[in-house]
Each structure stands twice: as structure tokens, then as C-alpha cells.
Image: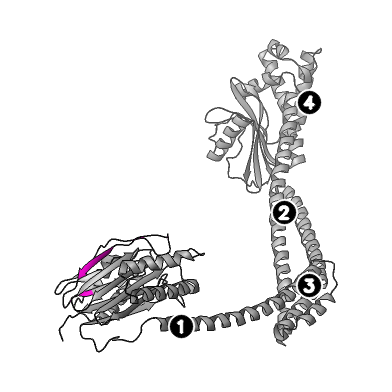
Amino acid sequence: MKKDKRNVSIIVMVAVFFLIGILATGVLTWFTETQLYNESVVRQTERRAAEIAEETRRAVMEYPAYEWLLRYWYNYPDELEIEYDAPYSAETRTADQCRSFSRRHPNWELRYLTENQCFSMSGEDQKLYAEIVYSWVISRIDEIKQSYHVDYLFCVLSEEPFDRQFFLFSAADPGAVRGTSYEEVYPLGHVVTVAGSQTAAMREALENSSHLADAGGYVDYYAWLCSFGGHDMFIGLTYDLSDLRADIRTQTRTGTTLAILNQLILSLICLALIYLFLLRPLKKVQKTIRGYKETKDGAAAVEELSALNLRSEIGRLAEDVSDMTREIDAHMEEIRTITAEKERIGTELELATRIQASMLPSVFPPFPERREFDLYASMDPAKEVGGDFYDFFLIDEDHLALVIADVSGKGVPAALFMMVSKILVKNHATAGLSPAGVLEAVNRQICANNPEEMFVTVWLGVLEISTGVLTAANAGHEYPVLKKPGGAYELVKDKHGFIIGGMGGVRYREYELRLEPGARLFVYTDGVPEATDADERLFGTERMLAALNAEPEAHPEQALKNVRAAVNAFVRDAEQFDDLTMLCLEYRGGQE
């Protein structure tokens, strides 16, 4: 049941994604159609306004003397006798005026008078001609207005601040309700103050030749007509957009609905195809993977996947899963082999650790019957086995040998080299050689057969117990630390010789230290001063001396614990990179 729910959830998830995609597509389509609708309204409004303005311009400019007429209408508005309130009832009066004018000028064609002919007429005839033509213009403009559903069609002069409306082409139809908040259009020659938005619209028209200002359901439009007296004249019109917008809105809604339905049908078809050719094969692949996870039967999983036999991405996915199953089986077998090998190596390393630990003196106090001295040593390897070593042994009843060394490298190779070096040092020391002689003999033997070119640093001291005289030699090792009775631990900067194994024929120099009763000697490997914290800072010899001097009279075992505690507090959680080996001797002389 749980598997079925998971399978159904894939289908539901895909269906939800498709529904979201359909909704997003619908919203995007609606938004796009809305944008197209708005652009179409603007485009068609501009085109219609331009058509109206062009027809109006032709209606005025079809008279050769139109500039003379415009100037006359502007200069003598009070002398014209035109019935603005009832332009259609003036047809008879206009006909009478035309017959009167023709009797006075029988040879002139009334509609095509030139400016020269107009200027040659008497003042009375000029007035009569201006009234006749204005009546004709009004009739033509009314036809344009009714054809395009224009509320107002008028002419203005672009005087700053655009406040002179100098004649009326046509007012609104009786009973019409304007959709704009601009001033009403007044009769010929009436001076008005134009509203701020209309002023801006006219300024735009002056600069750009035309301007379209949307005012809700109505539009104001200005188009350049001509120049007059150094100023530009503009045709102004206000018309209703409701019919235009209704037509475009209907087209937009129809297009949007069809687009969404088309998208829905295509999405359902795609969903069905995805289920047949994608989800169903994926469910089989999923079932096979789950079966393999439970049974770990790679052969059965490969057989089930090969049955799909699809030449598509799903088929290639099945092949990849089959290959992955084979690789997982092979990898698991390899892991089992590696794990067994690691367990074997781990067992051997554990044995090597125990062997190395048994090679170093580990019983303390090491010489309980000897009261002249006491000592303590420790070695903490960085890995299972280390390359550091310490040693101490009695050469005879009056001579104690002290050794501390650090082999290059870490791990098993360093441990093997360490054991060889330790045995060689002890053999030559017990043979009665001096510290320098011991180091020279060991170096000679190691250099004679050292193909891996490993080396070891060694500090070797031989204490004459009866006198407290310590004879030592240093082969590239750290400085020893000496504490005199009642004093503090201080570094002894002895002369270093070359490392053991680095070069044959090296000679080493010896030096002597006199230990008085109560003196302490501390030797160590570089793992102590070079212990590093998380910020890559070194512990250093200064901190080491501070740890020793925090309790200068401490027993050798406690002194080593103090240094180890200081190192741990310094490095905290940082990884130990090197072996930490220390040895401390307390010389008591003949005291109990």
C-alpha cells in the first residue's frame, strides 16, 4: 500500500505541475492579451484621431484662400452673423447668401476663390464670403463628427499659455454627456483659460506635431493645421472610445479564451503522453530499484530492467541503472575484500604497536635498588606505531646510558628503522665506546645499507653515577634541558653533529655536563616544541620550559605529565602530527 501511494503521488505531482503550468499560461496569456488590447486601443485610437484630423484638415484646406479665411475668422469674430446654436437651420440663409454673392461676382467660382480675389473684394463682400465658407465648413465638420462619434471638433491657436480658442467647428450633439473634465467649447472668439492637462497636451502637440491624451472613456487629440501670424494652429477634437474599446475587448476576450482552451487541450494530451511513455516506465524502474535494495539480487534487477527494451531516455536510464547495479555488486565485493585486508592490517598494526611498546623500557622505577638517580620516560606515537624512541640502560655499575632519538617519517617504516637504530646504539654503547664513538659507529653501519635514505636524530649521554659527570654527543637532535639544584630548567645549546644516516664518515664531538645532587635533565623529540594548534601556531620551547618550571621540583614522572598537559591545552582539538617522546632524569648522587 505504501508503494502504491508513492506511485500515485508522482502522477498527482505531475498533474499539479501541469495545472500550475496551465494557470500560469492562462495568466500569461491574459496579461499578454491585455497588453495587446491596451496597445491596440492606443494604436487604433491614434489612427482614428489622425483620420478625423486629416478629414478636418482637408475640409478646411480645400479652399485655396483658407489662410485668408482663418485670419478673417480670427480677426473679425464679432462681425460675423452665424447661428451657432442651430447650424442646420442656417442652410436656407446660406443659400441666399450664395445667390447674393454670385450676383455681385458672376464670373467667380465661389468655392475656389484665391487670396488675391478675397483681398480685392469690398469689406462687405469679404464678410459675406467668410460667413458662407464658415457655414459650409460647419456642415462638413458636422458630417465628420457624426461619422466618427466626435463630441467636440474645434480649432485653437498656440499662444502662450494656450488660452485663445479662436473659432468653433462643431459642438456636441444636443444632450451629449462629455467624459472629460476640460472646459466647455465656447462660441467663436471667446477667450477661455485652458486647464493644465490640456495646456500640457497642446504643448506636446506644438513640439511633436500631434498628441493623444487619454481622459477615461474619451480622448483629446491635437493635430497641426497650419501656421498663422507666427503661431501654430491646431485641430482639437474630443471623441468617445466606448464603441472602439468594446469591439477590441470582445476580440481580446475571445482570443484569450481560445488560447486557454487550446493550452488546456494540449496540456491534457501532453499529460497522457507523459504518463504512457515516461511515468509508467519510471514506475517499473523504481520498482526494480526498490527490489534490488531489499534483496541485493543484482542479476534479477538487470533481467527486469532489460525487459523494458525502450529506445528512449527511459531505456537509457534502465541501461544505466543496470550498469550501476553491476558496478555496485562489484564494488561491494571489493569493499568486502578491502575490509578483510584492513582488518588484517589493523591486527598486524596492533601487534606491531605492542611489539614496539615492548622494545621500549616501560617499567618504572626502572632501577628501584639504585638511590643515586631516578628517571621516567614516555612515547606517544602519532600513528599506530612511531619513529621516536628512548632508551636507558646500565653500561656497568657506575655508568648509565640515556638515549632519545627521532627517525624520519612515521608509521611502520619509521618503526622498523627505529628498532634497528635502537639496537645498534645499545650494542655499541654496551661495548664500551664513548658517546661520539657510538654515534660514529651507528652512522657507519646505517649508511652502509640505507637504500630508502632514511635518517635518525640521536642524543646520547653517558652519566658517571659516582661523580655526576655526563658525557654526551648530539647527532642533529633537539637541545637538552638542564635544571641545576634550586634553579630553573634551561636549554643547553650544545654542539650538533650531522644526522645519523645522512652521510658516511661523519665525526661527532662530545661535551660534558656536571650534575650536582638535585639536578634534573630533560630530553625530548621535536614533536613537543612543534606541536601545532588549529591556527598553525607552534607550541615552542618557551612554552615547554614554562610547563617544566611551573613545578620545577616535581618528580620526573610528574614533570612529563605537566609538559603533556600543557601541550594538550595548547593544541586542543587539532590533530597530532608527530610523535611526542620525553625523558627526565633526577640525579641524587649519594643522598638517600
Decide which of 79, 182 is in the foreground and name it. 182
Q: Earlier in the sequence, mark 3 or mark 2?
A: 2
- Give the amino acid at mark 1: Ile
Q: Earlier in the sequence, mark 1 or mark 3?
A: 3
* Mark seen at residue 318: 3
State if disc 4 and disc 3 touch (CB < 8 Å). no
Secondary element at image label 4: helix
- Tell me, yes or no, whether the highlighted magenta stretch contains residue 495: yes
Q: Position of residue 217 (x, y in %)?
A: 66, 48
The answer to whether 372 appears left or right of 236 in the picture is left
Judge the density around disc 3: few (<14), some (14-19), many (≥20) Cα neighbours within 10 Å: many
Q: Earlier in the sequence, mark 2 or mark 4?
A: 2
User: Can residue 87 be spotted in the picture?
Assistant: yes
Magenta part of the protein: which range? 494-520
Secondary element at image label 2: helix
Secondary element at image label 1: helix
- Give the amino acid at mark 4: Ala
Give the residue at x 68% y 49%. 38
Q: Which residue is mark 4?
A: 95
Q: Which residue is mark 2?
A: 33
Q: Position of residue 343 (x, y in %)?
A: 57, 83
Q: Position of residue 567 (x, y in %)?
A: 32, 73
- Give the amino acid at mark 3: Ala
- Tell me, yes or no, whether the highlighted magenta stretch contains residue 465: no
Q: Earlier in the sequence, mark 1 or mark 2?
A: 2
Cα–Cα span, label 4 and label 1: 138 Å
Q: Which residue is mark 1?
A: 355
Q: Residue furthest bottom?
A: 369
Cα–Cα span, label 1 and label 2: 87 Å
